[in-house]
Image (cartoon, rainbow, N blue to C red):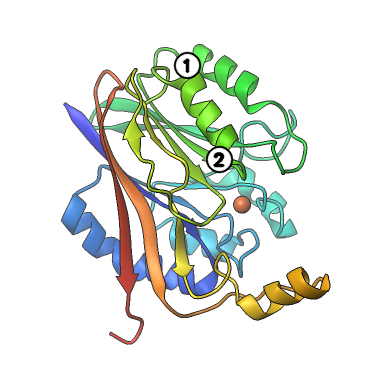
Amino acid sequence: MQIRILFVGDIVGKPGRNTFKSLIDDLKREYEPDVVIANAENAADGFGITKKIYDDLSKYADVLTMGNHVWDKEEIFSWIDDVDKIIRPVNLPVGSAGCGFKILTVKGMDVMVINAIGRVFMNPVDSPFSVLDELIDRYSNVSIKFIDFHAEATSEKQAIGWFLDGKVSAIVGTHTHVQTADERILPKGTAYISDAGMTGCHDGILGFKYEEALERFIKAIPKRLKVCKTNLKLDGVIIDIDDSGKALKIQRISKPFKADK
Ligand code: FE2
């Protein structure tokens, strides 16, 4: 017995949401995943998520993961504890709203989906190493564990990979919005990729128009970033895991979407 997970890289703004919603049925037909997980921390105009967008995206995914932008839309505090398909980084301060993991039942097996966030070049949070170590220990009865590790530094992502090799089924990096070509199965059976990539416009800088970003870089003017809309693609990975929790396969995907098709 094995399960297949489709993970969709960071969905950025409306172009990203449209790309995801337009391609997901074809992807489900092509890959026949048992579980669909998508990172949605940039779904609302690039910054956070609203209830309306949660209701929309959660029709197509089993779990939505978040990251450093989880609290950008303040309204989230009024609903995150009342819904069951969104998780926020597990290593935020104790007592934070929401939950950092979710256990699904898939083909009669428990599948634990965890969201965690890095600390290198990011805001201070609890150690992802100690929080994940404790959590994984506490749920040792769950064989299949998937982690979306939302982090800036590739070194920290690789460190989590080696730290948890053999203890979890898959570690998929998010946040940098650029898909990396380092997917592999680590020696003790954990599927790993430093970054799954991004779903949305690939003609800008991380899904945003480059003009405002250039103002920031060249003149240090803090222009508000605007989502760009062209060269749409859905980036992600397909991961196969056996019932003991060992990963069998990890495959990158990057699907273009022609909005006028
Ligand atoms: Fe992020």
Task: Please tell me how crowded label 1 is: few (under 14), some (14-19), or many (20+) other residues with Cα within 10 Å.
Answer: few
Which disc, if any, is residue 240?
none
User: Quarter holding the N terminus?
Assistant: top left
Residue depicted at x 38% and y 63%? 234
Instruction: Decide if residue 64 is in sight here.
Output: yes
Queried on whether the Cβ of the residue with tag 2 lies below 8 angstroms from ligand 1, the answer reads no
Residue nearest the viewer, comparing 99 with 72: 72
Where does the image place residue 63, in percent across and percent down from the top left?
44, 45
Answer with the quarter of the image where residue 249 lies.
Answer: top left
What residue sits right under mark 1 in the picture? 139
Q: Residue at x 17, y 56 (%)?
A: 30
Type of the residue with mark 2: Thr
Mark 1 or mark 2, which is nearer to you?
2
Residue 168 sits above or below residue 98 on the image: above
Q: Secondary structure at mark 1?
A: loop
- x and y percentages locating residue 176 in the rendered image: 56, 52
The residue at 48%/46% (across/down) is 85
- Indicate the position of residue 198 as horizontal and vertical percent values: 47, 59
Q: In the rendered image, which quarter contains the C terminus?
A: bottom left
Q: Is residue 190 left or right of residue 31?
A: right
Q: Which residue is mark 2?
A: 154
Relative to 136, 215 lies left or right: right
Please state if 134 lies on the left or on the right of 125 as rendered: left
Q: Nearer the viewer, residue 98 or 243?
A: 243
